Amino acid sequence: MSNVHSTALVDPAAKIHPDAEIGPFCIIGPKVSIGAGTRLHSNVKVSGYVEIGEKNEIFNGTALGEVAQDFSIVPGGDYRLKIGNNNIIRENVTMHLSTKEGKYTTVGNNNFFMVGSHVAHDVVVGNHAIIINEVALAGHTVVENNAYIGGISGIVQFVRIGAYAALGANSKISMDLPPYFLANGNPARVHGINMVGLKRAGFTIETRKYIKEVYRNLYLSHLPLKAAIEKSDALLQTLDKNSQEYEKISHLVDFIKNSKKGIAHHAGSRAEEKDL
């Protein structure tokens, strides 16, 4: 294993691809697998049942696969962490094992975890998410594809951050943030739609128009939530099921329908058209 530094401690039972690189003073446990092209810089500890995919870059001081901070943990249980491909994991990031036997804390592909961010037990992070410095994802939270979470923010247990949503720095959020929306504050409140992010991601004018309609139903119409969902669902049924518009609006409406924590409230006492 010529790509393993002489000072690294790698258990003989670990499965390290020959093209992976293990830097100085890293510690790799017996239940760890690391895919081709993944690089651990230095002083990285990977313990427990951890699967790391290909072409990840993991920086100094990161700890992956430590036991969850949860009193329900039974010593020696089959708790797991799975990390996909092409992730950047910067200095001092921590990602913990699940609390359910045979299940995973899961991180997808092409995510960027900045310095000191934390992924707790049973979290699910999708693809292309950006997690800024010192963000704390509490247990059982979900971060969907292309979400952005600003620095030093806390995500309360079981909360979901929707696809292409953006949460501002120094926020605490205890309710679900629907896809495509912007939120900020403590407690976090919705301020509008992530139009810049949607344009950059190639959302069509028509798709953005329909997202505005759902936003209006939720925050400008003064309808009860159930009625706002019904109105948005009726809008969805008018769209071509093979179109981008249907795909994106369907995801938004389903996200709201399936919310168990409730969706984040608007920032002001009354939302206005200027938010759009």
Image: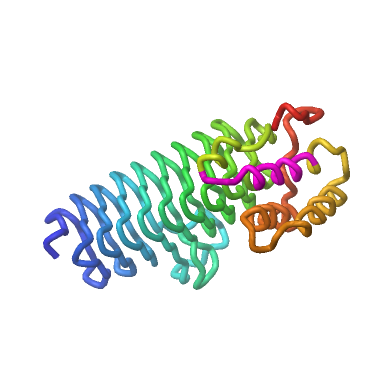
Range covered by the magenta-colored residues? 201-216
Residue drawn 63% across and 50% down? 160
Name the main secondary structure of what is drawn in magenta: helix
Given residues 218 and 133, the one toward you in this image is: 218
Instruction: Specify the quadrant that holds the N terminus.
Output: bottom left
Given residues 81 and 12, the one toward you in this image is: 81
Residue drawn 48% across and 48% down? 129
Residue drawn 47% across and 70% down? 77
Query: Residue 171 placed where, x, y %?
Result: 59, 34
Query: Residue 215 placed where, x, y %?
Result: 74, 41
Residue drawn 87% across and 38% down? 222
Relative to 100, is 180 above or below?
A: above
Relative to 133, is 81 above or below?
A: below
- Report if residue 148 lies within the magenta region: no
The quadrant where residue 199 appears = top right
Query: Residue 265 placed where, x, y %?
Result: 75, 38
- Report if residue 213 lies within the magenta region: yes
Query: Residue 172 placed where, x, y %?
Result: 62, 37
Lateral position of residue 7 relative to residue 210, left or right: left
Instruction: Specify the quadrant that holds the C terminus.
Output: top right
The quadrant where residue 187 appears = top right
Lateral position of residue 253 relative to residue 21, left or right: right
Lateral position of residue 37 relative to residue 234, left or right: left
Given residues 41 and 258, the one toward you in this image is: 258
Given residues 232 and 13, the one toward you in this image is: 232
